[in-house]
Image: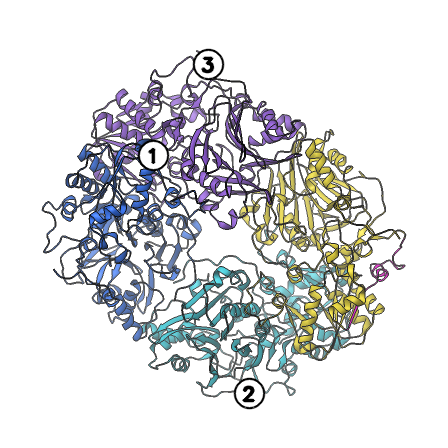
Chain colours: A blue, B cyan, C yellow, D purple
Amino acid sequence: MPDGIMPPAHPFDFDAALSDGDKLKEECGIFGAVGVTDAANFVALGLHALQHRGQEAGGIVTHDPDEGFNSARRFGYVRDNFTSARLMETLPGPIGIGHVRYSTAGSKGAAIRDVQPFFGEFSMGGAAIAHNGNITNADALRRELIERGSIFQSSSDSECIIHLMARSLQRNIPERMEDALRRVEGAFSIVAMTRTKLIGVRDPMGVRPLVLGKVGDGWCLASETCALDIIGAEYVREIEPGEMVVITADEGVQSHQPFRPQPSKFCIFEHVYFSRPDSLIGSKSVYETRRQIGVELARENPVDADLVCPVPDSGTPAAIGFAHESGIPFGMGIIRNQYMGRTFIEPSEHIRNMGVRLKLNVNRALIRGKRVILVDDSVVRGTTSRKIKEMILDAGAAEVHFRIASPPTAWPCFYGVDTPEREKLLAATMTEEEMRKHLSVDSLKFISLDGLYRAVGEAEGRKSNCPQYCDACFSGEYPVTPADMIKKGFQMKAAE
Amino acid sequence: MPDGIMPPAHPFDFDAALSDGDKLKEECGIFGAVGVTDAANFVALGLHALQHRGQEAGGIVTHDPDEGFNSARRFGYVRDNFTSARLMETLPGPIGIGHVRYSTAGSKGAAIRDVQPFFGEFSMGGAAIAHNGNITNADALRRELIERGSIFQSSSDSECIIHLMARSLQRNIPERMEDALRRVEGAFSIVAMTRTKLIGVRDPMGVRPLVLGKVGDGWCLASETCALDIIGAEYVREIEPGEMVVITADEGVQSHQPFRPQPSKFCIFEHVYFSRPDSLIGSKSVYETRRQIGVELARENPVDADLVCPVPDSGTPAAIGFAHESGIPFGMGIIRNQYMGRTFIEPSEHIRNMGVRLKLNVNRALIRGKRVILVDDSVVRGTTSRKIKEMILDAGAAEVHFRIASPPTAWPCFYGVDTPEREKLLAATMTEEEMRKHLSVDSLKFISLDGLYRAVGEAEGRKSNCPQYCDACFSGEYPVTPADMIKKGFQMKAAE
Amino acid sequence: MPDGIMPPAHPFDFDAALSDGDKLKEECGIFGAVGVTDAANFVALGLHALQHRGQEAGGIVTHDPDEGFNSARRFGYVRDNFTSARLMETLPGPIGIGHVRYSTAGSKGAAIRDVQPFFGEFSMGGAAIAHNGNITNADALRRELIERGSIFQSSSDSECIIHLMARSLQRNIPERMEDALRRVEGAFSIVAMTRTKLIGVRDPMGVRPLVLGKVGDGWCLASETCALDIIGAEYVREIEPGEMVVITADEGVQSHQPFRPQPSKFCIFEHVYFSRPDSLIGSKSVYETRRQIGVELARENPVDADLVCPVPDSGTPAAIGFAHESGIPFGMGIIRNQYMGRTFIEPSEHIRNMGVRLKLNVNRALIRGKRVILVDDSVVRGTTSRKIKEMILDAGAAEVHFRIASPPTAWPCFYGVDTPEREKLLAATMTEEEMRKHLSVDSLKFISLDGLYRAVGEAEGRKSNCPQYCDACFSGEYPVTPADMIKKGFQMKAAE
Amino acid sequence: MPDGIMPPAHPFDFDAALSDGDKLKEECGIFGAVGVTDAANFVALGLHALQHRGQEAGGIVTHDPDEGFNSARRFGYVRDNFTSARLMETLPGPIGIGHVRYSTAGSKGAAIRDVQPFFGEFSMGGAAIAHNGNITNADALRRELIERGSIFQSSSDSECIIHLMARSLQRNIPERMEDALRRVEGAFSIVAMTRTKLIGVRDPMGVRPLVLGKVGDGWCLASETCALDIIGAEYVREIEPGEMVVITADEGVQSHQPFRPQPSKFCIFEHVYFSRPDSLIGSKSVYETRRQIGVELARENPVDADLVCPVPDSGTPAAIGFAHESGIPFGMGIIRNQYMGRTFIEPSEHIRNMGVRLKLNVNRALIRGKRVILVDDSVVRGTTSRKIKEMILDAGAAEVHFRIASPPTAWPCFYGVDTPEREKLLAATMTEEEMRKHLSVDSLKFISLDGLYRAVGEAEGRKSNCPQYCDACFSGEYPVTPADMIKKGFQMKAAE
């Protein structure tokens, strides 16, 4: 039952506003802290650093020995909600978790009840949970739980885990969570908390990220290392695929293995686009990886031109790499307006493409007469690429060459990423040449899958029998069967 | 887990603002409609007419064949929330229920999650439920349900019923509700709905009210008849004590009897104060009953005086009756400010009793030199009575005589009414004469229990072996054992 | 230039919401204080008590030796704006004035810039001013001032006075104000302030009210005495017609006479409706005057009936008087909903007169079968009277007799009261009998002008050669020529 | 009189939030359009493109033949206010002007009354006016006008012009404006409007920018060309220094010369920082000029290093130029958080420099072990430079070399730019070497004045006898005497 609460209109984030559904969007960022004074402040800062992973809403739960559990969930940016002293005072205590989320594709409207973390009261005390990713058998679990008398309050996958925990016969919460996790399939990272324990989990293949940090005498968990930097925490290590850590202020980190071991399949698109460039994945800099993608792209698909121009802001590191490798000058041919916002009322028929003009303007003097290489991170539906191409040509470019820092996105993601339906993905229905014609550009080239693997450090490229990453959005090879989606009619790639 | 959402400050209702906890407060009003176009509009109007039963928050759930279930819950007045076209459009469909609520005494803060109606999805479809009253074994039921794996999302009694229904093995929702009702004890009226059925229930003793109305081809249920008047509905009858009605647009009203029969015990305080004077209870006008209370009061406790003055607004009908019976002129000696509001900042020590001055002013020219009879509906903690007496004396009254339209309130209500703890009730610790001295007035008289029963139409007065009404707040005789409260330490009246 | 700022929707006041333009509306209330700690708090309280004189907006200006002049102006109720500690802290100082206002008929939209008090900086310091009433030559003055280079920032009459003061050659502000006042014609009361002086003015005929109070060591000015009561101030006296008082904390009250003496013409409608019943006018209680109007009405126009019922709330005192004089029982046959509000969306064609039903409900059990006398304060356009009559008949009344506590309102007011255009006044185009037929009631009677004068204490009735009051709305005899309106085409009553 | 209205907290713009007063800030952007359908939409879009010139507040005035003048003024971003259909509908008509503003240094609080455009009603009709810049004799003019009876409603310089116009004896508004302009001194650009005429003015030296565009059949004026791009307008030309253009829909552009001719002195800091990189100044691209500054900087002050890193975002073009010229790789060593915001509550003493961390994070993997050249646009107070240096060193940089794209800022600007007092400018009290030590960096070099002039296209550098630009902030040579400031005690540079 969607609650008729409309999320308050809020300033858009840049890429989302620009792309109008023309980007893959990470659906969530998670953060937790324990053993610190006023954990909520740390959580708010961590979520602020993870805001790029979800802009629609955020929530924080804390526990204080005197005040018990408290929570606050809000639509809008962390900075606009969780900076109010009046609100933060309602979230006392040394332990807390938080969540930022994006709305799921196709959901009509959003309800505050769907904003995580979720909370459940068990006979031995309460627990809160937040996740990033997707439980691929959530529909089936939900049906089974409802049949047995559970009442769901949200449409979120996380709530299945809480109900499974409520019905577990184990006597403590971490064991109940292990019980519950054994029933779920999918690609997810979790932060959870009891009155004293901070818990972190990664799915058996480690598709979604989760890192451990040390801050003073306390500990924290975060989707990305940039959230450690903002609070001055030291990066300790990644949570391992399939690992569950239980952390207390007194006893530190204990590691559990609730799942059967499986090969690691980290999401390769985190390197391409989702993660912030100043984060580390493993020991690799995301920025450096992206720069290297630009280098590979220049090697694979060179072109004679006058200017390498990033599509701001996500294309910048690859464009720098491309320029460096190719020797063609790098320049900011497209300038973004920092004051993005809601849709303006278009003044008249004189103006085409207002949507893009509000956010981007072409640096006409730089572009005029030049053969321009535009470096973008991905092509999803192609709508933005078309508009940018037109702006560049209107400004007098002599040629336009697209170079894309990822392979063609031909398959939807079912692991916690908001993707258009398959038929709306340009690469699902067109060849590279067809796409080039569709965009009416002089050339259009994508990095190869092998090139991408090389850029992330796999010198030998992709091992096709057992890929080192989850690259389903490019390859159609899904490491976890998307059971619920298949039931709803999704056609897997035919075995070759 | 209280969600750290503060209810927005809103304009107070008059009596609440005046009394600062010195009134008993009905905790809820409920309304439902089926078989009408845009049921939400009817529900909003009905709740507006019932606003005196709960000012803190309101909620509406509707169902539409195309749009499914939708809900909206808001802090504040119905008029301030459910008059927005943008919001009402999110609540389509021919069936809906709604609720207005008062916060429970002692609860610190309120959360939107505690605002009714509540909703649960069962395997055969969803149901929403709202109630007025109290389930006296709710704590025990909640503990049991949590033990078995139910996750509670609110602190409300209603949620127990939803969870009991979720675990029932019956195959349709009305039968599941009958199952659930057999487990609950207490004093309550319920409106509930499925996709097509509007359901109304009164507890076995009929402590709380619920009436049935016909509006066009559709039907409605409401706490009071004034909510039928506002939508132009025809008053059909009261739902009987212990009755459950299931109403559909096509088949009309079907009556069920889920409970064992018990003697009727309607809340006599509904006559004295809770209900609106323009409502009917049974076939009796509330206004006329209150006027008759004034008549009885004048007969039982005459006094020689110059003016009969109501404490506005609830004392007015009894004052009219008192004046009529005694032959002493009726006059508006106390004028209320229609623009009530939040607490002002008191300008200086010059001003005593600012709180009351903001809401009431004495009509000094009328009062000066007169012997004044003040007619009020009840004395709870006595704080307001003291302030009013002081204002009257400051204005130059020669004598002040209080006449109270109810017997001394000496016991708390556990059936859905917000009452101070027993030790804060003036009449729990003082005799009538002690109260008179405490208030420093020339006389203070309460109507007798028998007088009150006569005024409501029981010519023989109260049958002490089996009282015709619930009058526990006066007599200490509780028709339903308040099990949860006894467990928490409440001492029942010793058997005589 | 209207600034496109829409006043935020706010809860209506009762009578305004009910009448939909069917009441005459006082346009303003004014208050000032000097020689007190935190004058703004006193001003806010005084304005709250005067809220019935203007609900659309309010403003306060204060002066503090350190902080200089500060102001705040807001749409909405005093209680909703001037109770915020954050706002009140911006208004420090021992001297302040304030204003509540109603919007003028016909003005489309309102701008915060039209909300008083107005402020002007002169070479010898600043002054703020607020008024209640109307300057009848404001248009001409404004044209002249603009011609000479003054820039107006509002559409308010008060601003003329500020500009006249700015151009005066006098060396101090009170003398500049005297200069300015000699140029203006009309009916107005003024409160003004400099850094240290509180100034009060009444027009030469004293049409609009202004009273002086003493609070601790300080002083205050107010439109009505009820605003003295709320702050615990002692009522000293009325400002005399044509008097200007200049008050300082140290030297107290000095009286000036800027105008040529003229006969006093206080607005008789203040007695009938505008003032609060708990105010005193001169030494007369407004409540008692209204009760006496009811007595006169019963004497002039007796009728055999069963019930005297006020149209709430303004008809109540006259109904009490009528009942007392006639011996017919008084009863609350119409009950108002205390939770007035914005327009609801009407659910369907089943419902007639929703507008009235939202605010009033008939006490059907009391009305049924009775011959009912409805006592109302006035008939302006007659629209509400019709709706109330229908509700009463629908409820089963046997007869309906209207008794109106004022003579027929046949002429517009140009002295600071919002009146419909003359052709919309029912009494401007119909005889009493035609009005009776128009309303379809069994009888309709107004108090006579002489009866009204007797009720306000003029034992001999109205002196037709020189009426003791301004009664232009009844008689068409305007004591001050409405020059601007005549220029706009208004036709005065032909001399007889 | 400051009106006690607090501007609502709003999301900061990036550079302002980062710098905490450590940037010079342009105080205003202006825009006007005539001869277009719904001019307000064009104005809103133009102001959105100029938002970097003023983030605190914005206002729009329009005129419609039927609806007359209308205005709306709001605190906050254009995108958050002027995108509401409900508001924009209140601003009809084919002609309009608008303004975005920054608060002036040292002003405590801001009032909506200070938000431009200003409006005045004259005997021949109304006019609205908005300006960017400063009137250097405004204080004297204001005193004189008040002495003669003008009432000021704001603290803005623009209002002087309106009052001077109101007192002019000329018979039409453009001539009155010429009259007024002859009295004012300073550096300013103006857009103004009557019912049918759009007017643009630049001060005699052309210190502040103003450009003319053609959009469909209509015309527009804007502070920068980027505001033409957003509405698809064609760039026609700059308004000349000392020129006043009067534009109507029918007769097009007429040019007037109200001032005595003076040598042109365009603000050179517009090239360095104020203007958007995608704007043109004259025929020169701002981006290209900044890139060229980087080239000059690399030539003047080479250093052996591993990485050229811009301080985002304003340092980027110069860093690109520096990298290109020096051959040292360009890299994004500092990543900004796109979700800037209000001040967070700092969690504990563990965290230093939270303010900067919220907005910037170091790309540690890129920086570690490298000798880093940081390219920034200017050093004002030096506080941000210190924090950034610390972050870079914390991340493991081997050396830090600052290269600044402007000469030392040693003098305040009095021509419409918000500058700290002179003693707070680092360069006012320290030599370059002292600054280097103060910042504890390995080297610190500023571009020379001659280098800067070369970069903007003056091949011969600065003509010291008559500089081609206003460079007072670097040189202390003020082309217009800041009369009001000198009266307040400002010490001009001693003649050499």
Q: Are marks 2 and 1 on the same chain?
A: no
Does C242 lie within the magenta span? no
Numbered circle sitting on residue B466: 2
**What amino acid is at disc 3?**
Ala
Does C458 lie within the magenta span? yes
- Which of the pair A174/C425 is nearer the observer? C425
> Residue C303: x percent and y percent?
81, 74
**What amino acid is at disc 1?**
Asn
Instruction: Point out the stretch of residues depicted in magenta.
Output: C442-464
SS at mark 2 in the image: loop
Q: Is residue D100 left or right of residue C267?
A: left
Q: Residues within 10 Å of mark 1 (few under 14, many from 20)?
A: many
Of marks 2 and 1, the one in the foreground: 1
Q: Is residue C174 above or below residue B485?
A: above
Q: Is residue C95 visible?
A: no
Which residue is situated farthest in the top direction here?
Answer: D496
> Residue D63: x percent and y percent?
57, 41
Q: Is residue A217 visible?
A: yes
Q: Are marks 2 and 3 on the same chain?
A: no
The image quadrant of residue C193 is top right
Q: Which residue is mark 3?
A: D494
Numbered circle sitting on residue A363: 1
Q: Residues within 10 Å of mark 3 (few under 14, many from 20)?
A: few
Cβ atoms at labels 2 and 3 below 8 Å apart: no
